[in-house]
Amino acid sequence: MIAVTCSPAGPKLDLNYSMPTPAPGEALLRVLLAGICSTDVEVAFRKYKGGFTGVLGHEFVGRIDALNLKRDKDCGFSIGDRVVSEINIVPSFSKSTNYHQRAQDPDRSVLGLINRDGVFAEYVCVPIENLHKVPDNIPPEVAVFTEPLAAACQILEQVHIKPTDRVAVLGVGKLGVLICFVLKACGKDVTAISKKGSHFDVLELRDIPTRKVSEAMMDMKEGFDVVVECTGNAEGFNSALELVKPYGKIVLKTTMAGMTHTNLTAVVVKELTLVGSRCGPFDAALRMLSTRHVVLDDIKKDIYDITAFPSAISRALMAETLKVILRVTPTSSN
């Protein structure tokens, strides 16, 4: 099968990668579309999780091609169902039973990131327990956003944001834009803050206020109650420390390689709460898409056939790019 793999030499297109076989309790999925996120780029060029080898990718929508049931009973899924999958996979002996537990299971593997082939391929195998059906009214070009949208929803699972709280999303790249959409949809007073102002037009169309970092720092009379840091760089945390008010909360979404030099004294002096935030609830993300509380149909997407992966990842590296999607299965099969 066709797959995009990662090795010490960098990412490459493999036209003869071995087909996976589902283990008991797993489904074989035909990948329809797969999204390239910033973490994929970091992994591809050995800047994050530098020891990973195998198939890249973890954001996708697919169809069930085969089911290998552990026992002869209804699993709730059928051949042909459109599905998305949580990315954290635990062994059969694990006691983890929900996404919270699987995300922190010490024995987990992670699609396209840790000890598990990902979704930049024609087929992928995942545990049936990780699957979620995609409602019929969500097109594949939108369903492919489920994983990052779930990560955005996770913030509201972890942090209580009062109606009077002012929230800043610092860094409005691929994930930051989705976080702004989710917070806005839930009635939060959110402001998008970015160094360069990329994607401000997308946010302003949805009546989300925008500010450049330099402007926000100069004009700030009082800090924000909550700052969501998703800049993708080490300096983002230092900016978040300046933007948040005393007794406020900083939600950290950035993952990166290397050390971060920061003044933790400010955390103590301002008596801040720090929250690390990662994977989130797929059911909430799918519900938001199905009810159109979050609308992504009009988001600019650059779609490439998987065989054009070199061009696709080059496009993903450009700051002005909001989302690059790989078409793995022809449109007629979606």
Image (cartoon, rainbow, N blue to C red):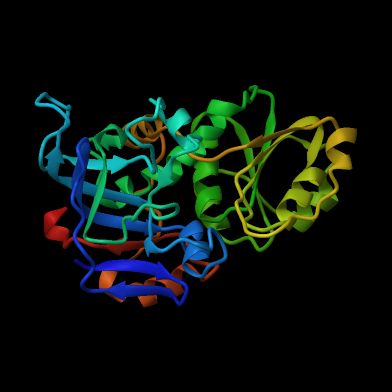
Q: Residue at 39% across / 55% down in the picture? A: 112
The part of the image, by quadrant, that contains residue 307 is: bottom left
Q: Residue at 81% across / 51% down in the picture? A: 262
Q: If the image is split into quadrants, where does the N terminus sit?
A: bottom left
What is the count of numbered marks? 0
Q: Up-down: is 61 above or below 233?
A: above
Q: Up-down: is 17 above or below 163?
A: below
Q: Residue at 82% across / 45% down in the picture? A: 242
Q: Residue at 90% across / 34% down in the picture? A: 269
Q: Is residue 164 visible?
A: yes
User: Residue 293: x and y, percent?
Assistant: 40, 34
Name the outermost residue toward the front: 93
295 to the left or right of 322: left
- 19 or 330, nearer to the observer: 19
- 43 or 192, nearer to the observer: 43
- 203 or 325, nearer to the observer: 325
148 to the left or right of 83: right
User: Residue 137: x and y, percent?
Assistant: 22, 38
108 to the left or right of 124: right
Q: Up-down: is 1 above or below 133?
A: below
Q: Is residue 305 visible?
A: no
User: Residue 205: x and y, percent?
Assistant: 50, 49
User: Residue 285: x and y, percent?
Assistant: 39, 35
162 to the left or right of 93: right
